[in-house]
Image (tube, grey):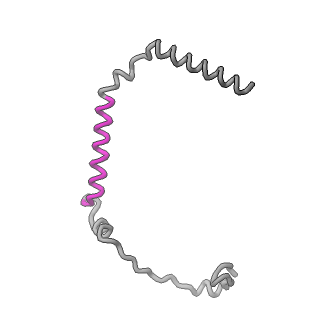
Amino acid sequence: MVEGGRGGSAWTTQELSSLTIQPVECSLSGAEQRDWNLSKDDNPNREKARAVRARQRAIGRELRRMYDDIAQEPVPDEFLDLLKRIDEESDGQDRKKTS
Protein backbone atom coordinates (compact mmCIF):
# COMPACT_ATOMS: atom_id res chain seq x y z
CA MET A 1 0.00 0.00 0.00
CA VAL A 2 1.10 3.55 -0.71
CA GLU A 3 0.29 6.34 1.78
CA GLY A 4 -1.05 9.76 0.91
CA GLY A 5 -3.51 8.88 -1.81
CA ARG A 6 -7.14 9.93 -1.46
CA GLY A 7 -7.34 12.38 1.41
CA GLY A 8 -4.78 10.51 3.49
CA SER A 9 -6.15 6.99 2.92
CA ALA A 10 -3.80 4.46 1.41
CA TRP A 11 -3.85 3.30 -2.21
CA THR A 12 -3.62 -0.39 -2.89
CA THR A 13 -1.23 -1.70 -5.52
CA GLN A 14 -4.23 -2.80 -7.58
CA GLU A 15 -5.69 0.72 -7.50
CA LEU A 16 -2.34 2.22 -8.48
CA SER A 17 -1.90 -0.16 -11.39
CA SER A 18 -5.36 0.69 -12.71
CA LEU A 19 -4.64 4.43 -12.85
CA THR A 20 -4.29 5.93 -16.30
CA ILE A 21 -2.65 9.16 -17.33
CA GLN A 22 -4.97 11.52 -19.16
CA PRO A 23 -3.66 14.20 -21.54
CA VAL A 24 -4.10 17.75 -20.31
CA GLU A 25 -5.15 20.61 -22.55
CA CYS A 26 -2.58 23.39 -22.52
CA SER A 27 -3.03 26.72 -24.21
CA LEU A 28 -0.18 29.06 -25.01
CA SER A 29 -0.38 32.83 -25.06
CA GLY A 30 -0.09 34.54 -28.43
CA ALA A 31 3.60 35.32 -27.98
CA GLU A 32 4.41 31.79 -26.82
CA GLN A 33 2.46 30.32 -29.72
CA ARG A 34 4.33 32.51 -32.23
CA ASP A 35 7.69 31.52 -30.73
CA TRP A 36 6.69 27.86 -30.71
CA ASN A 37 5.78 27.86 -34.40
CA LEU A 38 8.88 29.70 -35.60
CA SER A 39 12.02 27.91 -36.57
CA LYS A 40 15.13 28.56 -34.46
CA ASP A 41 16.51 31.03 -36.99
CA ASP A 42 13.23 32.97 -37.37
CA ASN A 43 12.60 33.52 -33.65
CA PRO A 44 12.81 37.32 -33.04
CA ASN A 45 13.68 36.88 -29.34
CA ARG A 46 16.60 34.66 -30.28
CA GLU A 47 17.79 37.18 -32.85
CA LYS A 48 17.54 40.02 -30.33
CA ALA A 49 19.51 38.04 -27.73
CA ARG A 50 22.13 37.16 -30.34
CA ALA A 51 22.47 40.84 -31.31
CA VAL A 52 22.83 41.89 -27.66
CA ARG A 53 25.57 39.29 -27.06
CA ALA A 54 27.40 40.37 -30.22
CA ARG A 55 27.24 44.02 -29.15
CA GLN A 56 28.54 43.14 -25.65
CA ARG A 57 31.43 41.16 -27.14
CA ALA A 58 32.31 44.07 -29.42
CA ILE A 59 32.27 46.52 -26.50
CA GLY A 60 34.47 44.16 -24.46
CA ARG A 61 36.97 43.86 -27.33
CA GLU A 62 37.19 47.62 -27.72
CA LEU A 63 37.62 48.23 -23.99
CA ARG A 64 40.39 45.62 -23.82
CA ARG A 65 42.07 47.17 -26.85
CA MET A 66 41.90 50.66 -25.35
CA TYR A 67 42.98 49.78 -21.81
CA ASP A 68 45.28 46.78 -22.30
CA ASP A 69 48.42 48.96 -22.30
CA ILE A 70 47.34 50.67 -19.08
CA ALA A 71 46.56 47.35 -17.40
CA GLN A 72 50.08 46.13 -18.24
CA GLU A 73 51.77 49.14 -16.60
CA PRO A 74 53.42 48.55 -13.22
CA VAL A 75 51.67 49.86 -10.10
CA PRO A 76 53.20 53.22 -9.08
CA ASP A 77 55.41 53.14 -5.96
CA GLU A 78 53.29 55.82 -4.24
CA PHE A 79 50.23 53.64 -4.59
CA LEU A 80 52.06 50.57 -3.26
CA ASP A 81 53.26 52.61 -0.25
CA LEU A 82 49.70 53.76 0.43
CA LEU A 83 48.41 50.17 0.29
CA LYS A 84 51.20 49.04 2.62
CA ARG A 85 50.29 51.73 5.19
CA ILE A 86 46.61 50.78 5.01
CA ASP A 87 47.49 47.10 5.59
CA GLU A 88 49.71 48.00 8.56
CA GLU A 89 47.00 50.17 10.12
CA SER A 90 44.35 47.46 9.70
CA ASP A 91 46.72 44.86 11.20
CA GLY A 92 47.27 47.15 14.19
CA GLN A 93 43.52 47.56 14.69
CA ASP A 94 42.99 43.80 14.43
CA ARG A 95 45.60 43.23 17.18
CA LYS A 96 43.86 45.77 19.44
CA LYS A 97 40.50 43.99 18.98
CA THR A 98 41.93 40.56 19.90
CA SER A 99 43.75 41.90 23.00
Q: Residue 85 versus residue 69: which sits nearer the camera?
A: 85
**Position of residue 54 measured from the top left corner of the image (x, y, whole percent):** 29, 44
Instruction: State whether the magenta stretch is mostly helix, strand or loop.
Output: helix
Quadrant holding the N terminus: bottom right
**Above or below, 75 relative to 65:** above
Q: Which residues are magenta?
A: 42-64
- Name the side, left or right, on which 86 lies relative to 79: right
Quarter of the figure with residue 73: top left
Quadrant holding the C terminus: top right
Which residue is found at the position 36% from the left and 76% from the top?
27
Q: How many numbered marks does the figure carry?
A: 0
**Is residue 55 one of those drawn in magenta?**
yes
Which residue in the rendered view is the most extreme toward the right?
Answer: 99
Q: Residue 19 versus residue 26: which sits nearer the camera?
A: 26
**Above or below, 70 relative to 22:** above
**Is residue 63 one of those drawn in magenta?**
yes
Which residue in the rendered view is the most extreme toward the left?
Answer: 42
Which residue is found at the position 66% from the left and 84% from the top?
11
**Position of residue 72 measured from the top left corner of the image (x, y, whole percent):** 39, 20
Quarter of the figure with residue 24: bottom left
**Position of residue 21 measured from the top left corner of the image (x, y, whole percent):** 50, 82
- Name the side, left or right, on which 62 lies relative to 22: left
